[in-house]
Image: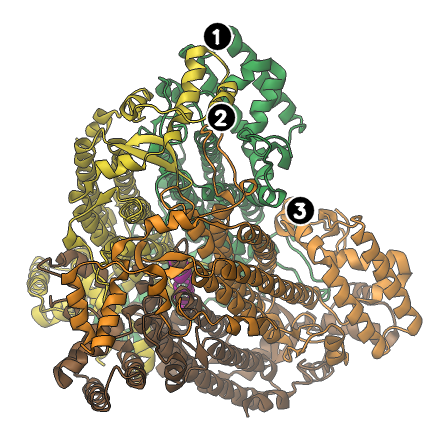
Chain colours: A green, B yellow, C brown, D orange
Amino acid sequence: MSKKLWQKGSVVLHPLVEEYTVGEDPLLDTKILPYDVDGTRAHVKGLHKIGILSDRELKQVLAALNALMRKYRQGKIRVTLKDEDCHTLIEKFVTQQAGSVGKKIHTGRSRNDQVLTAVRLYLLDHANILEAMIRSLAREFLKKAEQYQSVPLPGYSHTQQAMLTTCGHYLLSFVESLLDDADYLKMMGAHLSKSPLGSAAGFGVPLKLQRDYVAKELGFGGVYVNSLYAQAQRGKGESLYLEGLSQVMLTLGRFASDLILFSSREFSFFSVKENLLTGSSIMPQKKNYDAMEILRANGAVVQAHQSTLRTLAKGLTSGYHRDFQLMKKPLIESTEIITQSVEVVRLFISSLRVHKQSIAQKIQDDIFMADYATLLASEEGIPFRDAYKRVVSDGSLSLDPEVAVKKRLSIGAPGNLQLHRYKKRFS
Amino acid sequence: MSKKLWQKGSVVLHPLVEEYTVGEDPLLDTKILPYDVDGTRAHVKGLHKIGILSDRELKQVLAALNALMRKYRQGKIRVTLKDEDCHTLIEKFVTQQAGSVGKKIHTGRSRNDQVLTAVRLYLLDHANILEAMIRSLAREFLKKAEQYQSVPLPGYSHTQQAMLTTCGHYLLSFVESLLDDADYLKMMGAHLSKSPLGSAAGFGVPLKLQRDYVAKELGFGGVYVNSLYAQAQRGKGESLYLEGLSQVMLTLGRFASDLILFSSREFSFFSVKENLLTGSSIMPQKKNYDAMEILRANGAVVQAHQSTLRTLAKGLTSGYHRDFQLMKKPLIESTEIITQSVEVVRLFISSLRVHKQSIAQKIQDDIFMADYATLLASEEGIPFRDAYKRVVSDGSLSLDPEVAVKKRLSIGAPGNLQLHRYKKRFS
Amino acid sequence: MSKKLWQKGSVVLHPLVEEYTVGEDPLLDTKILPYDVDGTRAHVKGLHKIGILSDRELKQVLAALNALMRKYRQGKIRVTLKDEDCHTLIEKFVTQQAGSVGKKIHTGRSRNDQVLTAVRLYLLDHANILEAMIRSLAREFLKKAEQYQSVPLPGYSHTQQAMLTTCGHYLLSFVESLLDDADYLKMMGAHLSKSPLGSAAGFGVPLKLQRDYVAKELGFGGVYVNSLYAQAQRGKGESLYLEGLSQVMLTLGRFASDLILFSSREFSFFSVKENLLTGSSIMPQKKNYDAMEILRANGAVVQAHQSTLRTLAKGLTSGYHRDFQLMKKPLIESTEIITQSVEVVRLFISSLRVHKQSIAQKIQDDIFMADYATLLASEEGIPFRDAYKRVVSDGSLSLDPEVAVKKRLSIGAPGNLQLHRYKKRFS
Amino acid sequence: MSKKLWQKGSVVLHPLVEEYTVGEDPLLDTKILPYDVDGTRAHVKGLHKIGILSDRELKQVLAALNALMRKYRQGKIRVTLKDEDCHTLIEKFVTQQAGSVGKKIHTGRSRNDQVLTAVRLYLLDHANILEAMIRSLAREFLKKAEQYQSVPLPGYSHTQQAMLTTCGHYLLSFVESLLDDADYLKMMGAHLSKSPLGSAAGFGVPLKLQRDYVAKELGFGGVYVNSLYAQAQRGKGESLYLEGLSQVMLTLGRFASDLILFSSREFSFFSVKENLLTGSSIMPQKKNYDAMEILRANGAVVQAHQSTLRTLAKGLTSGYHRDFQLMKKPLIESTEIITQSVEVVRLFISSLRVHKQSIAQKIQDDIFMADYATLLASEEGIPFRDAYKRVVSDGSLSLDPEVAVKKRLSIGAPGNLQLHRYKKRFS
C-alpha cells in the first residue's frame, strides 16, 4: 500500500478496510482514466488562466499528461490497488514527470468533482457512440424490411395469431423503436451536458475558478451552477443515462424473444447462419440461440443496475458519501453490455433468413376475421358490433393474404408502410 | 357480470378468472376515463372524415360523450367490475344515449390502441401539470434561499462537517435540481407526444383512417408510424415518464433526509410549523417529521413501480399481451404519489425556520482547513499538496465564517450564488 | 378529522399532511384489524396478570372486543381516515363500550409493537393458509400427472426440442416444486413465530409485562427478546415471507409461461375449458389465456413488492421510522395476489386437456439423438464423446417414443417417476 | 478458440457471439471449479457402480482429478475464454492425464446438471461458512454489550430521542439479529441440500444412475427427484440463499447507518480506531467512515442481485435456457460481498469506543416522559390516557437515567437484558 494523498502521521489504513473500500475501482478507474486526463487538462488550463500555474508550468503538466496517455494507449498503465484510484495515479505520474508542479494540479479541485467530471465525460462519449451504433443498426433492420417487404407473416397477440401482417411491417417496428431510442440518447445527452468541474467538494474553493471556460474546453453545453447540486445530482444523471440504455434493451429484448420463438421448430419462421448458434454437450441435434437468450437475460442485468443506482441514492443527505463510488460499476458494465448487445443483434439481423413457405403453412384460416368484420362494417355500412357478430356466426372465411394486407391502408399499417418517414429520420 | 363485447354463444367467463384478470382496473379506469372520452371524440371525428359516420351520427355521438362527461364530473360515473373496463362503459353509454350509432364507434379501433391512447393522454397531461408544480416549488425554495441567503451553515460530506456554506447556497441546490427535473419532464413530454390511435390491434385495419388528423385533434406532436411499434412501445413510454418522476423523488428525497437529520435535537438547524408534525401514542414529548419519512419511503415505492414496468415487459414477444394491463397501476399510483409529495414539500419549505444561533454553535473550528490550504497555495504560490501538509501540522485555524464564505468566488460557490441564472430559467 | 391519541393543545394536523401520512392505511388496517384485536386481547390479559386491570375490567374489555369483532364480521366496521388507524379505532371502540377502562388498554404498549404484532399474526396466519392451499394444488397436479402419465411430450431446452419426456413427468415437476414451496412456508413460519408484543416503542416500559405468557396466548413459538430488535427486525420478517410467496410465483409463473406457449396454435399441446378464456373486441376468433398472462405479470408485481420492502429498510438507523408503515401494503397485496393466483391455477390445471395426437405430430425425429449416444456408450462400451460423434455422422434415428422413455430409468427420469416419494410428502 | 464439445463439422462459432455468450464465465467458473471437481468425483463413482467405468478406469479418473486440484490450489489453473467453461476444462484435463477414459466421464451427464451441482455445492459450503462467521460476529457484539452494559444511551424513533436505553441493550439488538440470520442460513441450507446430479438435461438418460448414492457421496440430504424440476428449480434455490444474505445485510446495514450517525460530531457517541477511517484529498480535518458507507451501499448491490435472479427467471418456460448462466454472478458476487462485510464489521465492533460523557450531555430532559406516564398509570392506577395528558401538562420531569432504565423490567427491556437467552443460542 502506498501513501494516500490524505494520509496523516503514521496511521496506516487497515488492509481489509482498504480492500473493502477500494473494491473493483482499479478495474473501473482504468476505464475512466482517459476522461480523467481530459478533465485534468482542462482544469490546469483553468488554473493557468487565474495565475496558479505559469505558462511554463502549464506546458510541463500538459506534456506529462500527454506522456501518460501515450503509455495508456500502449496498455502500459493500469490502475492498481496501491494507486488507490485513477485520480491519485494521475497526480503521481505528473509529479514524477514534471516535478513539483504536479503537486499544484489538485489546487481548487477535490476528488469529488474530479470523478464527477470524468464519469460524465465517459457517459456523454458513450451516449454519442451508442446513438450512432443504434441508428446504424436501424438501417440494417430497414434493409431487411425492404428485402422481405411483402412476405406475409402472422401477427400475434397473446401469443396467438391475431391478424396477418408482413415481414416488412414487422421489421419496421424495430426500425422505429431504434430510432426513438437513438433520439432519446441524443436528447438525454444534451440535458446532461453540464460540467460539475469547479464544484470541488460541493462547497467551492476560495479561488475564482473559470468554470464556464473550463466547461467549454471540455465540450460541455454549460455548467451545473450550484456547487452542492453538482454533487447532489450524482445518481440522477446516471439514472437518466441508464434509462436510455434500458430503452435500447427493451427494443433488443423484444427482438431476442421473437427470434427465440420464431426459430423454434414449431414455428420455423426465421433462421440465422449456423456460426451464430451453439450446440449441446449431450444432445447432438441442438442448434441453440444462446446469444439471444443471453441478450434477453442482459435486460435483467441492466434493469438491476438502474435499481442499484436508485437504491444507492435513497436516504442520503446532501453532500458526498462514499456510497456514490458504487455508481460507477452499474454505469460502465451496462454500457459495455449494450455495446456488445447492439453488435450481436447486428450479426443476427444481417444474417436473418425468412422462410416464406414455412410461414405460409402456419397461417390460420380465421386470421382474417377482424378484416372481414371491418370490411363488412365499412362496405355495407352496418355497425361494427353487428358485423362482428355476423362474422362469428359465419365462421372463418379465407382471403388471399396479399390482398388482405394491401387493404390495410392507414398510415403505418401493413398496406401503407410509409418507408419515407423512416428514411427522413436517418438524414 | 354483464355480457362482454367479445362474448360468443353461451359460454360465460368464470367469475374467478374475471375477478383475477380485471383486478384493480375499475378503480384505475375510472381515472383514465376522461382521457378515453377525449380519444373517442377524436376517433369518431376521424371516422366521420372517411364517411363511416354521417354528420348526424357524429353529432349524436359527440353529444352522448358530452353527456357522459357531465355525469362523470358530477361523480355519477364509476367503472365497476360489471363494466369490464372504461372502453366498454363508453361504448355502452353512447349506445344507450344515441342508439345504434354507438355500435359503430369501435369501427377501426381495438381496445389495444384505445387504452394506449387514453394512457398516453393521461401521462402527457400529468407531465405538464407536474412540470408547472415543480417550477412553482422551485420558486418557493428560491424565496427561502434569498431570505436566509447568508446564514452560515456547515456543509457535510460523509455526514461529517466538511466546509462551511450558507443556507442560501444550500437551498439553491434544490432550486437547480427542481429546474432540471422540470426540464426533463418537458423534454420527455415532447419525445412521447405521439399518437398510437389507429394502430388497432397492432396490425392496422382495412380502412384509410386519418391518423395524422386524429393525432392533431388530440394535441399530439405526431404519430407512432408503425402500427406494431405503437403497441410494442408500451412500457417504454411509461418507463421514460416514471424516470422523470423518479428524478423528482430523488430531489425531494434528499430534502426529506436532510430535514429529518437537521431537525433532530442533536442538530437543531431547521424546524417547521407544529401543525406539520405528528406525535406519539406513548411518548408525549415527540414531534415527528412523519411526512418527510413517508416521502423518503415513497421514493422506494416509485422506484419499485418503475422496476415493475420493466419486469413486466421482459421476455415478451411482439404484440399485445394482457401483462400490459398491469402497467397502468404503477403509472397512476406514482403520479399521485409525486403530486402529493410536491404539495407536501411545498408546505414544509414554506414554513421552514432556520435557527441561526443553534447552527452557529455547531460549526467546528477545523471546518476551514480546506480554505486555509487553498488560500495558502494561491496566495503564497506553494503547491497545494505542501499547503495541505502545512495546515495539518498547524492544526485548525479559526476564520470568521462570513469572511471565509465570501472568498469562495467560483461560479455557484457560496460566495457567488448566481441567482440571476436561476431567475432566467423561470421566465 | 377526529382528535389524535397524541394530540396536544390546539394544534391540528394539516389535512394535507394527514392525508399524505395516512395514505392507504384505512383500507389496509381494515384487513389487519382482526389480528390487532387478537393482539389486544392477549395484551389486556397480560395487563390483568400484573394487576393493571382488575378481573371486572378485563371482562369488560374482552366483551367490548368481542362486540367489535361481531360488528366487523357483519361488515359494519371499516377503518376510515378519521380513525387514523385500526389501533386508535379499537381503543376508541372499547372506551365507548366499556367506559374509562378503555383508556387503560394502551398501558405498556406503543402503536409500534401493536402494529408489529398484528402484522406478524396476519403473516403467520396466511403462511399457514397458503401452505395448505399449495399442498392441495400439488395434489391436483399429481392427479393430472397420473391421468396423462405416459403420454409422450417433447422436452425442451432453449425453446427447442431436446429429449422426449411424458406428460406425467412434466406435470410432476410442478408437484415437487409446489411441495418445496409449501415446505419453505412452513419452515419460514416456524422461524418467524416470535412475539414482538411488550417491546413498546423499542425500549420497554417500566412494568413487568408477561411477555412469554402473552406470546403463548397468541400461539407464538417464543418472543423476540431484545425490545429494540423486535422493532429493528421489521422488514426482515416481511422479506422472508415475501421470499416464500415469490417462490410460489416462480413455480406458478413457469406453469403460466408453458401454458401460453403450449396452447398456441403452433404447438396445440394443451387446452383448457373455454370459460377460462377471454376474447377480443376486434378479432372474433381469439381465445386468449389472459389469466395466465396476468399471472405471469403478477410475478413482477410480487417481486417489486419485495424490492420495496428492502429499499424501505435501506439506510435506516435503529428505532422506529414512519417509513415502516409502507411495508404493510407490499405484504397484504402480495398475499392477496398469491391467494388468487393459486386458485386460478387450480381452475386451469383441473380443466387441462392434453392433445395426444397433436403432440405426437410435433415430435421431431432427431429428438432421440442423446438417447442413442448414451445407449451406444453404455451398450457398446465406447466413450460417450465418441458415441456422440457417431450419432452426429449417422444422423437422426427414429425410436419408438414409449420405448425410448421407458429406458430412462434413473430416479425421477420419465421412465422412473417415483410417485410414491411425492405421496409420502402429503401425509 | 479451441474446439467445443458440441462442435460439428467445420462451422466455427463467431468470435463476437462466443465472447458475448461466455461473458464473465471464465472468472466465475474458476471459483466454482473445485465444486465441479467434487461433483465429477461423485459422478464417476456412480458410473463405476453401474459398470460404465472399470475399477482401473475409476482410479485413473480420480487420480487425474486429484492432480487437477493440486494444480488449482497452486494457482496454476485458471478457466480462460478458450476453455469455454470449467466443465470442458475438467473433461479435457482428465482426458490429457488419463487418456480416453476421460471421454467417458460425461456419460449420463449434461453440463446442465453438472453446473447445477457445482453451484449448489458452492452455495451450501458458503452458507455453512457464513453461518459460522455470523455467529462469531454475534459473540463480538455480545462482548461489547457486556462491556458497556449499563452506559445510558438515548433510544431513537423518527431520528428523535424517544426513551432512554443502555449501550448493552442497544448492542444486544445486533446479537439477536445476527443469531436469527445464522439460524435462517442453517435452515435454508437444510432445505436446499438436495442433489440435482443425474437429472442430465432435465429429462434423464437411458441408464440407471445411482442418484441416491451419488447424492450421499456429496453430502446432500437427498435428491431433487423429478429431473425436470431439478432444472426448473434453478433460480429458486439461489433466491432463497440470497434472501439469507440480504437478511445479514439488513442487520449490518443498520449498524453501518447507526455508526455513521453516532460518530458524527453532532452526536459523538461512538468512535473506532483511526486506522479504520479514511481522509479527504482536500479537507485535512476529515475522518470518514467510508467502510460503513460502502457497507450501506453494498446492501443495494446485494438487493439488486436478488432482483436480477428473479427477473432472469421471469417468463421462462420449463427447461434449460442460457439465461440461467447469468445467475452465477449475483450468487458469487453477493457471497464475496457478505463475507468481506462481516469481516469489516468485526473490525469496527471490536474497536468500538463508547463516549460515555459525550452521550450523557446529549440526553434530553423530556426523554423520560413515557416512563412517567406509565409509572403514573401503574402506581396510581389511573388510566394511561389520563396519565399521558397529565405528563403533557406537567412538562418534562428529570429522572436519574440509571434508575429509569432499571425500572424497565419486561423481558428484553433495558432493565432486563436476558443475556442467558443469547448465550444458550451459541452453544
The amino acid pointed to by label 2 is Val
Secondary structure mainly formed by the magenta segment: helix
Are the residues flagged by discs 2 and 1 from a single subunit?
A: no
- Reading the image, the residue beneath label 2 is B392
Of badges 3 and 2, the one in the foreground is: 2
The picture quadrant where one finds residue C228 is: bottom left
The amino acid pointed to by label 3 is His
- Reading the image, the residue beneath label 3 is D14
The reply to whether residue A299 is in sight is no
- Reading the image, the residue beneath label 1 is A54
Which chain does tag 3 point to? Answer: D
Q: What's the CA distance linking mark 2 and mark 1?
A: 27 Å
Q: Are marks 3 and 2 in contact (CB under 8 Å)?
A: no
Mark 2 packing: few (<14 Cα in 10 Å), some, or many (20+)? some
Q: Are marks 2 and 1 in contact (CB under 8 Å)?
A: no
The picture quadrant where one finds residue C116 is: bottom left
Q: Which residues are magenta?
A: C298-312
Pick the front one: A389 or D190: D190
Residue C273 placement, left or right of B146: right
The amino acid pointed to by label 1 is Ser
Q: Which x, y percent locates residue A337?
A: 54, 45
Q: Residue at x 39, y 55 (%)?
A: C317
* Magenta span contains residue C304: yes
Mark 3 packing: few (<14 Cα in 10 Å), some, or many (20+)? some
Number of residue marks:
3
Q: Residue furthest right?
A: D56
**Residue C306 vertical position relative to residue A215 in the rendered view, above or below:** below
**Residue B205 vertical position relative to residue B174 in the rendered view, above or below:** below
Q: Which x, y percent locates residue A190?
A: 36, 32
Are the residues flagged by discs 3 and 1 from a single subunit?
A: no
Q: What's the CA distance linking mark 3 and mark 2?
A: 59 Å
Q: Which x, y percent locates residue C190?
A: 49, 79
